[in-house]
Every structure is written in C-alpha cells, then in structure tokens.
Image (spheres, rainbow, N blue to C red):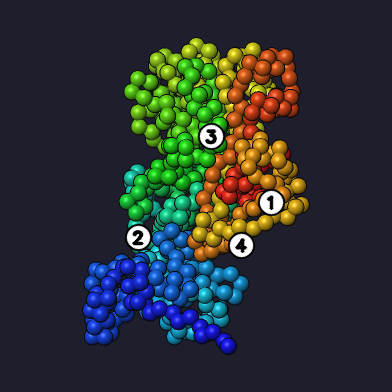
Amino acid sequence: MVKPAKQRLRLGDALVQDGLINQQQLERALALHKQSGKRLGEVLVEMGLVTEQDVVEVLGRQLGIPYINLSTYLIDPVTARIVPEHIAKRHQLIPINKVGNKLTVAMVDPLNVLAIDEIQLMTGFVVKPVVATSKDIKDAINKAYGSDEGEMNDLMDNLDDIGSTSVSDEDELDAMGELGENDAPIIRLVNLVISQAVETDVSDIHIECFEKDLRIRYRLDGVLHEAMSPPKKAQAAISSRIKIMAKLNIAERRLPQDGRIKIKVNQKTVDLRVSTLPCVWGEKIVMRILDQSNLKLNMEDLGFEPESLDKLHHAIAQPNGIVLVTGPTGSGKTTTLYSALHKVSQPDVNVMTCEDPVEYNLHGINQVQCRPDIGLTFAASLRSFLRQDPDVIMVGEIRDYETAEIAIKASLTGHLVLSTLHTNDAPATVGRLLNMGIEPFMVATSLILIQAQRLVRTICKDCKIEYKPKIDLIKSLEIDHEKCVRIGLPHLDPNKLLLYKGKGCELCGNTGHRGRIGVYEVLVFSDRLKKMVLDGASTSKLKKVACEEGMLTLRESALRKMLIGKTTPAEVVRVTSE
C-alpha cells in the first residue's frame, strides 16, 4: 500500500503553527485578502502582524525553496541584465547567479509559474527560483539596472562611446564625498564598482587592461573573482575618474602613483588606498578597501589558539623589547598589530606609530603618516619618537638596516617596539635581521616574540556538511595520534576522523567558503634560543628547538582549525607548507 504524500501546509496555517500569528488574526487577514485581491503575505505585513522576512522564510521552508538575504549577496550586473529590467520589475525578481545552463532567480513569489516560463523561453536557461523579500529585490534591481527606468542599460550602452568623453575637474569628489547618481555614465560605473565592493566586504578591487578587453575583479576572502568586463573604450575614462577621486596626476601615465580616496557608502565612511601601475596595454589600478567597521580590535576574535594568545598577551605586557609580526601582504598583520595596540593603549601609556600608509585611525594613539618623498621615513620618524617620551612604539614595517637598528636601540633603552617583517615563518625572521646587518647580540637581547601568520578561508555555516576523509588524505597531512596531542586535540582518533566542507549555496556564491580566520606560529624568544643565535645556529635548528618548546607551526595551527571544523584540507594545503 502506497502512503499518501505529506500535504504541505498553506502559508497562513504555517504562520499559525510557528506562533507568528493566531487563528483570529489569520481569519481577519483572509477576509482582507479576498476583498483586496492582494497576496496573503502582503496583507499580513500591511496589518503589522508579521515582517516580510517572516513571510518569505516560512514560505521558503514550506516550498522547499531556499531563502536568500540579497543585502549581503554580490550580484553581477551582467548576470542581472540577462532579464530585461521591465520584466524584473513587473514580476519582482532578479537573476543572481548563472552556472552552466542554470539561472538562479530571486523572486518574491516563487510560485509564479508564468514568470518562470517567460524567463525560460526568453533566455533558454533552466530557472532555479529562490525566495527573497520585495524590499531586497527592489534594492537589488535599483543597484543592478539603476534607480531610474533603464538607467543601467543606458550606462552600458553609453560606455561604448566613452572614448570621446573627458572627465573634468568639476566631477571631482570632495575629500568626504558620497557615492551617488551623476549624469556621466562613467561616474555611475565607477560608483557602482566601489559601492558593490564595499557592501560585499571585498578587500581589493583590481581594474586590469589587456589588448582587446578590460576586466574588473574583486578579492573576496583572499581569492580573486571576476566582477564585470566594461568595454575597452572605457579604459582611459575609468582611469581618469579614479585618479581625480584620489587626487592623482591624470596626465601621468608612465609612472606608478599612489593615492587615497575617502568616501561614504550607505552612510558608512570608507577609505580606499589607490595604486596605479603602467602596464603594456595601459594602467592597472588596484584599490584596497579600508573599512573601519570591519576592523577587529578584540584579539580573542582573530582565531588565536588559547596558548598562542597567552604568549602574545605576555609579550606585549613587557616594558621593553621587540615583538615582530611576519607574513606576506594581506595576511592580517596590520589587524593583529592594531589589536595589540588597542590592548596596551591606556590613559597612562604614550603610544606612537609610524605607518605607510595609516590604514585605520585609532583613538588615543598618535599616528604618523610616513612620507619618504620629503624625507619623513620610518627611520626619521623613529628618531623623532625617541624625543616624544613614548612608552610603546609601532613601526609599520622594518625594511632596511637603518630602521631595524633604531628600532632595536629603542627597545634596549626601555621602550616596547611592535613591527612587521616579510618572512615565510617565525624562525626565518632571525636570519632576515642578521642579513640586514644587525649584530647577533643585538637580536638576542632585544627580541621577545616573533609571530608568523596567514589567513585561511572558513567554511560557510549555511551549507556546512560532515564527511569521512580518505585514509590517503589523513596520511598526506601527517595526522596521527602524536600530532593530535601536539595541537591540543588528544581526544581525537586519527582513524575515526570526521572533517567538514561547504556544499556550496547561494549565500557563499557556491564556493563553500565565507569569511577568513587567522593561523598563527608564535615563537617566544627563550634563553636557549638567544644562546643559539649568539652561537650562529641555522634557521632549521632554531625551528626545531622552538617546536620542542611548544611552538605550533603554521601548518599545525591550520590543521587544528581544520579538525575543529573551521576550514578545509584544501585551504590548509593552499595557505601553509610543511
């Protein structure tokens, strides 16, 4: 005997079952629904009984259709324009993703079969509906097509003729300009590129020119994604517009230039660090987005292992010495240093920094912007600091012998010095300082702690799934009982491990990853290590002893985060080496 299919609850009954409304309220709403002809969900929202988000979440659950928060989703305007604007507005929908022959479309009413059929016939794609609120869809349509009728379509059409368009000084934004609408299509395009990047937590915008095309890419969670491809003719105008905003010389196309833009996006003030570089087919422009609201100043939120965080807290509590943070560009060194400064900054402590550039403004800390073109270098700033009665000094980066020497001398005369260095791991930092010309005894007497770090992508929480890894994978990562004990997870059985990954969903752009977390290698400069430096020990010997004294390597820190379900084996291998 075949069991009858489970009957799906109607929207009103589902809302009653979830306790969002009662039966009497439902009956009143149904009466108004019949009189007005409006959708029941719309009537309930107008009555103030539920929010629109309540309705779409229940509707999505009842229909088995995912709900998506479009306010946090990056929509490519090219994908959105697969469906004409008048159809998107008429049916309250917008295409948000395209994979193969499947087009994901966010809809207010995912049961609108006529709209789905119309899009499938028009585009030739198989439509996969997801549900979103009407407000989010309206906002997304305005961003993708333009707030006025046909604006985005006109923008892309007009860009074909942009080669003859000049950008005048009248278009220049004020130092605290606000992105908005403007008659010039090129200005709207640049505003769109910046506002989309800021709203989706992108870290960098890359504008790249090639022989026959132009490409704009966003770096999201440390990985570059292509965002859009404006016409090649727009190249010169885009470059000029960004240079004007950054107060750069628009006539200079042969030399690199650096500048800064300060703008407001949705009432949020954001800094953009602009760098231009002459390439074969024109200038490449990279804009680093510095969003004060995204700065994490609580060290507990950065992903430190408890024992590593204790070591760092102990080091920055010392009255003098040097603490170095190392790693490549984009590994989170600045965030770690700012978090440390926030920790030590007190009314009775004089904290001074020299940076190039000053990425974030910190209250209660004296920050100096270095300007090498007029002689205000790291070394010159450090010399002046020593006459300013500092307690804690932060140097943006130790790049040369002069800066290193002054920083070490400052630490030996009773100051705590924090700085960064570009090395692959913590033990290699000693060799880097010695190669700069610093004497071994100065390194041994001044260093307190060296920390190397990287950033790994975290698994998307909305599509996270559990799986049993293959034995070959466990062996390749060298995970055994001894390793589990070493990284602080002695309860795990290497033969019964369960790992995690992201299946891929609309919220993470089908990548399976969303957000990043740090992995850390914290080397405390013990008496034994100091003696080894004085004796001229190699980097490999220093690393071996540091591990014996309890240092977790970058790979081990990443493995720990993998085993507790924060990241994936692929990320561990991509970011760290053994």
**Label 2: which secondary element:** loop
- Mark 3 or mark 1, earlier in chain: 3
Residue on which the image places disc 2 = 182
- As measured in the structure, the alpha-carbon distance from the residue carrying label 3 to the one carrying label 1 is 25 Å
CA distance for labels 2 and 3: 51 Å
Q: Say which residue label 3 marks.
A: 306
**Left or right of residue 478: residue 48:** left
The residue sitting at the front extreme is: 1
Q: Which mark is residue 212?
A: 4
Residue 415 x/y as whole percent: 47, 16
Answer with mark 4 or mark 1, whichever residue precedes in sequence. 4
Q: Earlier in the sequence, mark 4 or mark 3?
A: 4
- Closer to the chain start, of discs 1 and 2, is 2
Q: Amino acid at mark 1?
A: Lys
Q: Which residue is mark 1?
A: 496
Above or below, comparing residue 506 to residue 83 in the picture: above
Examine the image and state in which quarter residue 524 appears: top right
Q: Given contact means CB atoms under 8 Å apart, are the residues at marks 4 and 2 in contact? A: no
Tell me how far mark 4 sits from mark 2, CA to CA: 28 Å
Q: Are marks 2 and 3 in contact (CB under 8 Å)?
A: no
Task: Tell me the quadrant of the picture where the C terminus can be found.
Answer: top right
- Mark 4 crowdedness (10 Å alpha carbons): few <14, some 14-19, many ≥20: few
Q: Tell me the SS state at disc 3.
A: helix
The reply to whether dot 4 and dot 1 touch (C-beta < 8 Å) is no
Element at label 4: loop
Q: Label 3 amino acid?
A: Pro
